[in-house]
Amino acid sequence: MSSMVLFNALPVVTNAQSVSSVKVQQAGSPANAQVFGNLPGDTQVQVNLIFKLQNKDKLARFIQDTTTPGTKDYRKYLSVSNFSQNYGANSGAVKQLISYLQGFGIKATLQSNGFIVAAGGTADAFNKAFNVQLVKESYNGKVFHGTKGSPTLPADIGNQLLCILGLSDYSNLTSNAVKQPPLLENGSVPTGPLSLGTKDLVNQYHVQPLYDKGATGKGQTIGIVTLADFNPQDAYTYWSKAGIPVKADRITKTDVDGGSGWDGYDETTLDVEQSGALAPNADIHVFVGPNTDNGFVDAFASAINENKAQQISVSWGQSETAVDFFTQLNMETPAYAEVFNQLFMQGAAQGISMFAAAGDEGSYDAARQFGNTSGIPGATSLSVDEPADSPYITAAGGTTLPFHLHNSTYNVDITNSQERAWGWDYLFPYFDARGLNNPTQWTDRYLAGGGGGFSQVFATPSYQLNVPGVNSFTGVKQWNENADQSSVTRADSATIVTGTGSGRNLPDISMNADPYTGYAVYFSEPGQPGVGAGYATYGGTSFVAPQLAGLSALINSANGTQAGFWNPQLYRFAVQKDSPLHPLNETGASNDNGFYTGTPATVYNQATGLGTPDVTALANKLK
């Protein structure tokens, strides 16, 4: 695994109480980016200054109590103002920071959650306030702004800050949606679920009894955090064509920080269609932020601070390995993961059920981004996805449904007889026969699967401790890494290995995510509703996160309650005799995500987490 350092071992700011100023962690610029001039002094720049939460241990205990029956705070959630008062930044430090920034002509306001200060001003003003030089840069074909030098602030302010975001607007966030590669060429005759709809999910995971008792998601709001625009009309058309009667005018779109472009609009479209189909009378509020650190943070903060959505999903992220690499290049702050963790703690304290896609490159989460020939150390190491790695969000993993493929050209038969962890090793004979068995193809197809493994950033949360299968693993070793884990080669044969791990275990819960047993998505041309409209089949854990948000809305409406943070409850249910979760604990290449597989007699594994849900049984447990 890549050599990464636990977040809590990294200093957020230098310990410099005896001097007049301190350096503050920031997302900066690539060490080898090309600089082509200073950013014009009158350029408007938006920056977030993130304070550390106060009383964090007390907050963790409170969140635990909100999910524990019999405690005085069970399902007694905080308002945003109460969260700010109890856990936000020290008011004196906030006032001092705002006054300091205003002295340079920078407008600064504290967000309602009490720990993010949004600041806007000219590049020249920030240069003077932070003792930096904002410059224009390019890297890997992207043009952006960054800084020369590290920002400094007065010590009594800086020592209370977690980091600064926005002095660079470089970003590497990607969606976890995968379009179904073609299977019908060269004599292939696939059977099984190649293009699914809502009814298929309802049947597979025992949802229908909730509809039979009248649950529709009424009174619920689903929040979608995304980094790409979409055509709302596509979702209404999808629901209409599927025969799903939905609440009229149910979609609200908020462009956060000016919104975003269309790169990834298929992701946003499927998030809305899938979540809304499962809870047809729920409202849907889509928060579209720019594809930058600031945009991602502000989109989450807007959704959580509004505090109207009882459930929120996200299907964007990047691997811990990538974040570590970009941090070493001064492109990312070591505090990146903790910024989102603080936001998710806020959401949990407010009773919001939050879901994040666990990734689509199986146990090798960075491989798709870097490839097998980058030469970057750790590029093909075992890794997991951020922000799904936060202990305060439910990480959504992926499975494959029963499936059969016969190819007469190559005389290949592929059969999955039962639901299994999503890993495309079941298709290796087909890929090999097609001549895809070369290093450039390995990260595109051979390493695909549901994300899972061990976080190297966050420790094992208390709710996972002592759950059979957590912090131990069985693996199917099919790849050999070179010395610096920058590339892999095929092993001669698959071997079973076992071992122990540490850190937050991912995912938490799984449902179908394989593009070859994927779902139909309806969309039209970007910004042109109805033009070039049609269906395409996609998969990815991008589906599971919004589907869980839709099911959360359905469960809450069925029970007339607000279930809050799922994870402590899921792990408690999983060890009970009448568990509503079905572990996929068969061992071997018939049930793995590229490496991790099941272990008999356990309830958890790093390929599928606690397994798949019986949604009606889960709803009964969450009453």
Image: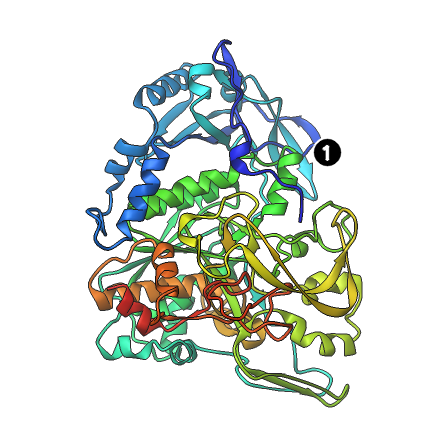
Residue at figure coordinates x 78%, y 79% from the top left: 433
Closest to the observer, 560 or 456: 456
Q: Is residue 285 visible?
A: no
Closest to the observer, 445 or 531: 445
Residue at figure coordinates x 47%, y 44% from the top left: 296
Residue at figure coordinates x 24%, y 37% from the top left: 82
Q: Is residue 332 visible?
A: yes
The vertical placement of 534 against 269, above or below, is below
Q: Which residue is mark 1?
A: 32
Residue neighbourhood size for the residue with mark 1, other residues' Cα within 10 Å, grouped as few (<14), some (14–19), many (≥20): few
Closest to the observer, 239 or 115: 115
Q: Where does residue 377 sit, x and y in percent of width and height?
A: 73, 45
**Colour convention:** rainbow
Q: Where does residue 549 sit, x and y in percent of width and height?
A: 37, 61
Q: Where does residue 147 sit, x and y in percent of width and height?
A: 61, 26
Image quadrant where residue 102 sits: top left
Q: Where does residue 148 sit, x and y in percent of width and height?
A: 63, 23
Look at label 1 and name its amino acid.
Asn
Closest to the observer, 274 or 517: 517
The vertical placement of 261 against 83, above or below, is below
Helix, strand or loop under label 1: loop
Q: Is residue 97 left or right of residue 281?
A: right
Image quadrant where residue 349 sits: top left
Q: Quadrant of the C terminus?
A: bottom left
Q: Is residue 300 left or right of residue 447?
A: left
The vertical placement of 214 against 79, above or below, is below
Residue at figure coordinates x 68%, y 52% from the top left: 381
Q: Is residue 183 left or right of residue 530?
A: right
Number of labels in the image equals: 1
